[in-house]
Image (spheres, helix red, strand yellow):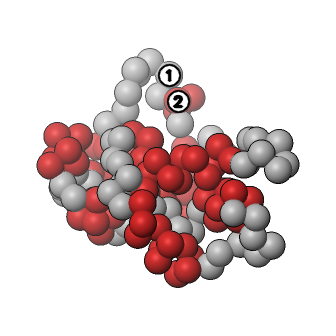
Amino acid sequence: MRALYPRRKWFSPELVIATPDEKFRGAGLSRSKTVAIKDLAAKTLDGTVPTSAALDRMSDEEIIARLTTVRGIGRWTVEMLLLFDLGRLDVWPVDDYGVRKGYAKTFRKKELPKPKELHAIGEKWRPYRSVAAWYFWRALDAPAGRA
């Protein structure tokens, strides 16, 4: 993407929409990625994608509902945004393999918990489930038997 706009520090949604698909394809983006990027640009312009200031005022579920309407953006992607970019404290990414595996390692489970099961388990850590998720990710960095 940066190579397509070498003299710009940033590129606007208008510029992305105006860029012919062939340029994106020539830069190595698949047809699907090109459509997704253009959808993101269009939904930024029409207000579906909130501004940073608006995100700060929205609930996690409102943000998830809005952003998952963009092609190529799923719940997990938005949960990572909530956790790492917005610093939300009560995000519980039950579909995240690392969280599931870290939970299993921590509690010495032979099988990974199913997302539905992990959802129920996570209630005990509310309203700080993001912290629990972080610890389960870090548990995977610990040597075996030390989670």
**Amino acid found under the numbered disc labelled 1:** Pro
- Measuring from the top left, give residue 78's x and y in whole percent: 41, 57
The residue lying at 38 percent from left, 66 percent from top is 68
Viewer-nearest residue: 86 or 108: 108
Q: Is residue 112 left or right of residue 136?
A: right
Task: For marks 1 and 2, give the CA distance.
Answer: 6 Å
- Measuring from the top left, give residue 32's x and y in whole percent: 56, 63
Q: Secondary structure at mark 2?
A: helix
Q: Is residue 110 left or right of residue 20?
A: right
The residue lying at 23 percent from left, 64 percent from top is 62
Task: Mark yes or no: residue 1 visible.
Answer: yes
- Check contact, mark 1 vs mark 2: CB within 8 A: yes
**Amino acid found under the numbered disc labelled 2:** Arg
The residue lying at 65 percent from left, 75 percent from top is 113
**How would you rate the neighbour count of disc 2 (Cα within 10 Å): few for under 14, some for 14-19, many for 20 or more?**
few
What residue is disc 2 on?
Answer: 2
What residue is disc 1 on?
Answer: 6
Viewer-nearest residue: 13 or 115: 115
- Measuring from the top left, give residue 107's x and y in whole percent: 69, 63
Viewer-nearest residue: 9 or 68: 68
Total marks placed: 2
Q: Secondary structure at mark 1?
A: loop
The residue lying at 61 percent from left, 52 percent from top is 136
Residue 6 drawn above or below residue 45: above
- Measuring from the top left, give residue 124's x and y in whole percent: 42, 66
